[in-house]
Image (tube, rainbow, N blue to C red):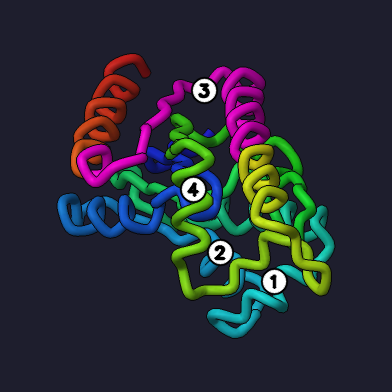
Amino acid sequence: MKKMAQAYLLGGVNGVGKSKLFERLQESRPEMDVVHTASLLMEWLDIKPGDYDSLRSLPDRDKNRECGNAIRARLARAAIEQTVVFDFHYLNLIDGVMGPTVEGAWPAVMNGLIMVDARPDTVYRRVRGDARDRRLFPQGRPLPAEGEKATIANFVGQTRAEFGRLAASYALPNLVIGNDTPLDTAIAIDRFLEFDKRVRSEQ
């Protein structure tokens, strides 16, 4: 079996702060290949870059299957000595409906899973402070604030459970990184690098 690059999924819910962590990782470790999975999938499916509505409109099973295919293909092109980190969602929340993001056994090719985590109130505050329309809540029938908060709390809880399920199913090393404060963001890269070093030493 062909050896592949060292590969990790680094995921979490919308608004948990993954983008900032990825920026910091790219700045501090430019030799690592940081892959934004949604962009990779749009390129794989020949969808115009940034056209998230077209991506969301695809049937979940088809989209999830092709996501796995795109990730495998990306790893097949990577040099063995590379470390490739994929931005990921362990669950999706679209228009108030949660759904899976994994179809098939492709997570088995990963060397580890990382979840960026935060309290539901932190996530809600970030989501509501963001000008982007993430389409997390039902369209056309707005929820009251308490309903939105409950939706986010459920999303966070279910994502934690799915992360644990995937890690256990594939016997993968895993790490949870708390990201509630700027200080958490500052130390997260060090925690990831320590995790990467440990995983390599145990292979």
- Report x, y in % for residue 63: 74, 60
Is residue 66 visible in the rendered image? The answer is no
Q: The disc labelled 2 sits on which kind of residue?
A: Ala
Say which residue appears at 63% left-offset and 47% top-offset: 149
Residue 188: x %, y % from top left:
26, 38
Q: Is residue 149 above or below residue 27?
A: above
Q: In what element is the residue under mark 4?
A: helix
The x, y position of residue 130, in whole percent, is 46, 68
Query: Pointer 4: what residue?
Result: 123
Q: Name the residue tied to disc 1.
A: 55
Q: Which residues are magenta?
A: 156-185
Marks 2/1 in contact by CB < 8 Å: the verdict is yes
Task: Choose between 170 and 96: the one closer to the eye.
Answer: 96
Label 2: which residue?
A: 38
Q: Secondary structure at mark 1?
A: helix
Residue that badge 3 annotates: 172
Cβ–Cβ under 8 Å for marks 2 and 3? no
Q: CA distance from mark 3 to mark 1?
A: 29 Å
